[in-house]
Amino acid sequence: MLRVNRLPLIHYGVAVLASLLALLFRLLLEPILQGEAPLLLFILPVMVSAWYGGFKPGILATILSALVGSYFFIPPIFSFVPTDLADAIRCSIFLVEGISISALNESLRRSKQRSEATALSLKRSEEQSRLIIEGVQDYAIFMLDLDGRIVTWNDGAQRITGYGAGEILGRHLIILYPLSAQASEAADHLKPQQELQIATTEGRFVSEDWQQRKDGSLFWASIVTTGLRDETRNLRGFSRITRDITERKQAEESLIRSAHRLEALHEIDRAILATEFGGEPIGTALDRVSQLVPCERAIATLFDFETNTAQILQEARSEGEANPEVIPLVFFLPERLFQQDLQQKVEYITAAQICPVSLTRSLSAQGSCIRVPLVSDEILLGELTLFVTATTEWSDEYQDIVTEVANQLAIALRQSQLRNQIQQKADELEQRVIERTLKLQAANQELESFAYSISHDLRAPLRAIQGFAQAFLEDYGDRLDNLGQEYAQRIVTAAARLDTLIQDLLNYSRVSRTDLQLQRINLTAVVEDVLTQLGASLQEQQAQVIVEKPLLSVLGHRSTLVQIVSNLISNAAKFVPPERTPQIKIWTELREDQVRLWVADNGIGIAPQHQDRIFQIFERLHGVEVYPGTGIGLAIVCKGVERMGGQMGLESQIGEGSQFWIELRRGT
């Protein structure tokens, strides 16, 4: 359905009606005016139409007034054309005045509407701001004049401070400050005035400070004071927003106290864990806990159920004897509990309502105490006791602190006991080692004496047997048959083999016992010396030896190295099939800070399952009649390398030869 906006029609209707009324009024005044100023009266409907309806209705009234006025009052009557120039000018002036009046009224009308709209908007905004400010309950929001007197007051301010608006409006800001600040009121309200001065110069002042309620109680407040200025930057007053942050401050202080408590407990833990049984750090820990938990005496008591005694350790600040006091255990536990289980002992200490006799006796006073058992690994070690002469209630926080310290102290005491036991066992073990070392030294001396006897006493008759058997063969060999000669030759061979065996045993013993002083050794010189010593034997075996020079230097013992290299080269030339010419290759290689010396041959090789056996003393893989030897050579090599802090090994396959290696630290 089409809807028509009736308001413009009404405005135009007013213009038409006003013009007709002006015409009627002019006709009524015609006899009096007698044709003077016929159009001046029509200015009124133009003004009314423009004021009421705006520019367009004013223009309509102007046109209608000009037409009606010209039609009725410009002769000849009922003519729309002016008769002379004066009438034309009058009509033109009327039209200009009508248009101007309409435009001015339209402008005034719109200005008025904008002003009314602005005023209404400001009123609504102020109302909303007022409602918001008055409705805020968690903040005190109010205004101050230039002198610092309160001019507005919201509900939040009343709730926080307890002052109603009627009680505080017009009063100075100093009323909200504690008595210490109010005492300076004679000095121009020093503290509040400083805050207002800062807000004036810097624009705002932010602080956290104590404020006072109506009932005199104090609260921590977060304060923001802002200077208010108009469009010309003139200061008009101050706004102040205050919030009660007492709970937050209390929480912060609680956190700080907890942090300090935690740090103190950590210091106590460190002091406890650093202590020895009954040592001074325990006294320091007791001193610290007595600072955390207000008391007159902090005591750690250690129980000894074997002797039924108690050892009292006091805090470091205690005066008196330096040594711990030892008293009968019955002062702390009834004798009937000595042999009872852990739970009953702990329950007795925890549930005790009176202090131990030793405490009240030493202090010559009655009081209250908190007793916490020291338990670790299900063993009652003692108790931690805090004492005050006045009757007091121990808070849960204090009990938690004492319990925590007691737990740490119990762990430390138990660890100290275990350390003492370990130290005692270590001392016993060290004593046994000393005794066994002395026995080993005696055995070594006996072994040295035995080796001396072997080298002198045993080898002397052996050489005699060997010599006489050889002489017997030379002098009487032609008188013996073949079997006799064979027997005599076996005696000579057996004596020589026994002499070699004794010599190898002496070498093995010497390598095992000699104090080796390691120094830089040139392996090239060592190998050359060995090849010179073995020259005749190698030439007899037609062995070919290749040395890849230069050989690297090592840290070792020269005579031991000569013996090791000699044994390796001798074995390389010995264990070769009869139909094969011995070929020996010697070289070194660097492995980080180690030097590896290789001795490779083209001999019979060693099966993998036997490669560990050959380094043991008297271990042989072949009979003496096939490959002669004593079975001690590689054992000497292994022992010598071990004494010099090195390693050895081999790589070998049956029928493909062997590669023996020793590894020692590089000589710098």
Image: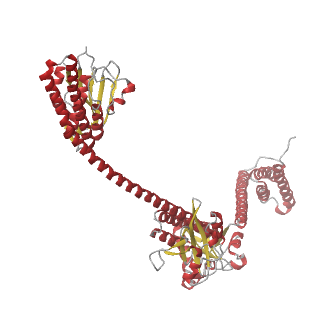
In the picture provided, is 198 more to the left or to the right than 35? left
Q: Residue 559: x, y in percent?
A: 20, 38
Q: Determine the residue positioned at 32% across, 27% down.
A: 620
In the picture provided, is 500 more to the left or to the right than 57? left
In the picture provided, is 70 more to the left or to the right than 543? right
Tell which residue pokes out farthest to the top in this image: 579
Q: Give the colouring mode of the picture.
A: secondary structure
Q: Residue 74: x, y in percent?
A: 79, 52
Q: Quadrant of the N terminus?
A: top right
Q: Nearer the viewer, residue 368 or 578?
A: 578
Q: Is residue 334 above or below residue 458?
A: below
Q: Is residue 605 visible?
A: yes
Q: Is residue 90 visible?
A: no
Q: Determine the residue positioned at 66% across, 79% down.
A: 170
Q: Nearer the viewer, residue 72 or 442?
A: 442
Q: Is residue 647 above or below residue 131?
A: above
**Which quarter of the figure has residue 168?**
bottom right
Tell which residue pokes out farthest to the left in this image: 475
